């Protein structure tokens, strides 16, 4: 009938809640896990001897913007099977960090390794007097710890702006002879298990997102000209993760 108002169908109950899950929880976690898997695949655990922790492989909650943590809490409460995967992820992260520490402790205590670091450093400084000490801000007495960190993290090459880049380019391969033994086998096994679990978790999140956007007829990510019922805004991706992709050799 002419002049009759056309009433748009009301959104399905729970749509706004699901949008919050997808845009502030699921999408950031998918983005973060993809980057995380690349670190694990390369055996670059991003472990740091100074903090005794993994720098860029985080507990899942830390991938979420602080303002969206209530959405994260609501999500894991509503999806208990994913809550279990979240706990498993964080437990595997702790185990990996602990195994990094054990491998590091084993390596820095190894007399042959200490001797190799000392001789390589002497050779480098004599052959490159203009370059000076290659450890940068790392105290000379801690240089072997820096080298051990590179070995634990399977760092094959360093960016050219690193003070230790030329030293590592020359001697790095020689140091990997020390990356053997039970401690490193245990470390690599825990990293492989973590990577496999990440793959399973990632697929579960991708499948869940696909099902939710189909069921609730919402975009998989916010779009600028989207004029849906909620007008959801504020998604900014995985917290702090946009800068991580370029730091894989750190």
Image (cartoon, rainbow, N blue to C red):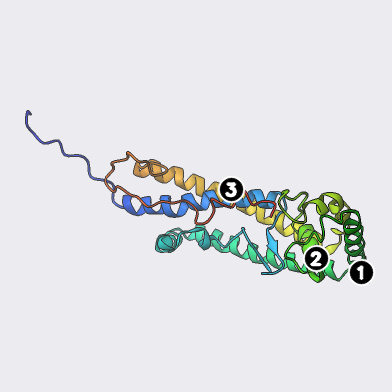
Q: Residue furthest top?
A: 2
Q: Earlier in the sequence, mark 3 or mark 2?
A: 3
Q: CA distance from mark 3 to mark 2?
A: 32 Å
**Nearest to N terminus: mark 3 or mark 1:** 3
Quarter of image, res 225: top left
What residue is pinned by disc 2?
A: 143
Is residue 77 visible from the viewing direction of this image?
no
Residue 210: x %, y % from top left: 45, 42
Residue that carries the numbered disc 1 in the rendered image: 111
**Secondary structure under badge 1?**
helix
Q: What is the x, y in percent for residue 14?
A: 32, 53
* Mark 2 surroundings within 10 Å by alpha-carbon count, few (fewer than 14), some (14 through 19), many (20 or more): many
For this rendering, which residue is in front, 90 or 179? 179
Residue at the spot x=38%, y=53% of the render? 20
Q: Quadrant of residue 162?
A: bottom right
Q: Which residue is mark 3?
A: 34
- Quadrant showing the N terminus: top left
């Amino acid at each position: 009938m002419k002049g009759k108002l056309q009433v748009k169908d009301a959104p399905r109950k729970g749509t706004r809640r699901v949008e919050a899950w997808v845009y502030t929880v699921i999408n950031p976690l998918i983005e973060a896990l993809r980057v995380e898997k690349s670190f694990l695949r390369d055996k670059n655990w991003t472990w740091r001897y100074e903090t005794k922790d993994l720098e860029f492989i985080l507990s899942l909650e830390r991938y979420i913007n602080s303002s969206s943590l209530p959405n994260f809490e609501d999500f894991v409460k509503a999806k208990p099977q994913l809550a279990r995967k979240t706990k498993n992820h964080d437990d595997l992260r702790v185990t990996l960090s602990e195994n990094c520490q054990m491998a590091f402790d084993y390596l820095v205590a190894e007399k042959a390794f200490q001797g190799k670091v000392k001789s390589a450093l002497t050779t480098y400084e004599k052959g490159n007097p203009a370059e000076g000490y290659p450890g940068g801000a790392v105290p000379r007495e801690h240089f072997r710890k820096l080298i051990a960190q590179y070995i634990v993290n399977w760092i094959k090459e360093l960016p050219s702006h690193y003070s230790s880049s030329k030293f590592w380019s020359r001697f790095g391969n020689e140091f990997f002879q020390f990356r053997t033994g039970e401690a490193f086998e245990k470390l690599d096994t825990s990293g492989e298990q973590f990577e496999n679990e990440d793959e399973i978790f990632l697929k579960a999140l991708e499948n869940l997102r696909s099902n939710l956007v189909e069921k609730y007829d919402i975009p998989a990510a916010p779009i600028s000209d989207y004029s849906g019922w909620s007008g959801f805004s504020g998604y900014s991706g995985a917290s702090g993760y946009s800068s991580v992709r370029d730091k894989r050799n750190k």
